[in-house]
Amino acid sequence: MATKRKSDDSTASSASKKPAPFWKNGLKTSMEDPELVVYKDDKITVIKDKYPKARNCVYIYIQAKYHFLVMPKENIPNLKSLTGSHIDLLKYMQRKGKEQADSADETLQFRLGYHAVPSMSHLHLHVISQDFDSLSLKTKKHWNSFTTDYFVDSEEIIDQLEEDGKVSLNTATFQELLKKNLKCHVCKKDFSTMPALKTHIKQHNYRRK
Ligand code: AMP
Ligand code: ZN
């Protein structure tokens, strides 16, 4: 029977000792896909997330919603592979991510950060607008991965590297965050279903102050 695995399940457990399945390397393939690449230089590639948790399209009269991934050219599998020697690269990725957000919509709120336990191989910085208006954002795991401490701000990762020369995240505790009750990221109201939460979040204003 074929293995049922969707590569947009961005919160898979990393506890398994089995060889990495093929879909884990999908980002490296997407770094070469002209349909997805929005910026490229000698250090980094920026792509549109293939299963955006905010929308990458512009609709007339509707706010634009965006989800990009900034990735280094250098082969860096994940946060644990980082050392002090990567600080300048991470700062560059953050700067380019901010530029990408501004060029998409400089009035919309964005967050730039990493999933504590990523599902995909190759280091990737999420640049995501805070409307979360997307058909691909379907599950409690998706929601909690972007709206709880499971989503670690880029600045925090850079601070850790500057202080300790490495990134120390206790991955076991992060899995618990994905099971938390649904909560609006703006007003903190609780919800029992994703459809109710997604209807609710449309009422908030995601413009920068
Ligand atoms: P994570 O590894 O949990 O930090 O998130 C991986 C992100 O990559 C998710 O937001 C997915 O929607 C996205 N994604 C998964 N597969 C691909 C792919 N082949 N190309 C581009 N983006 C992808
Ligand atoms: Zn709310």
Image: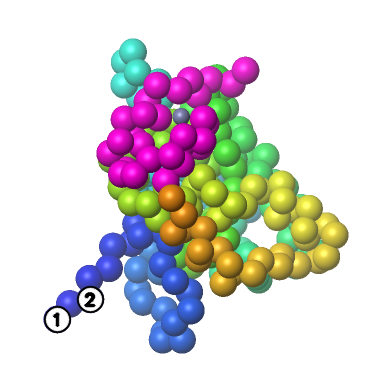
Residue 180, position in %: x, y? 46, 54
**Whether residue 75 can be seen here:** no
Determine which quarter of the picture holds residue 162.
bottom right
Residue 53, position in %: x, y? 39, 43
Amino acid type, mark 1: Met
Instruction: Please tell me the numbered disc located at residue 12.
Output: none
**Does the magenta run of residues contain 183?**
yes
**62 or 13: nearer the eye?**
13
Label pair 2/1, CB-CB below 8 angstroms: yes
**50 or 110: nearer the eye?**
110
Amino acid type, mark 2: Thr
Residue drawn at 44 percent across, 82 percent down: 16
Kindly give the residue lying farthest to the left in the view shown. Answer: 1
Position of the N terminus by quadrant? bottom left
Position of the C terminus by quadrant? top right
**161 or 76: nearer the eye?**
161
Look at the numbered disc 1 and give the secondary structure of its residue.
loop
Q: What residue is shown with label 1?
A: 1
Instruction: Please tell me the numbered disc located at residue 3.
Output: 2
Q: Callout 1: few (<14), some (14-19), or many (20+) C-alpha neighbours within 10 Å?
A: few
Magenta range: 182-209
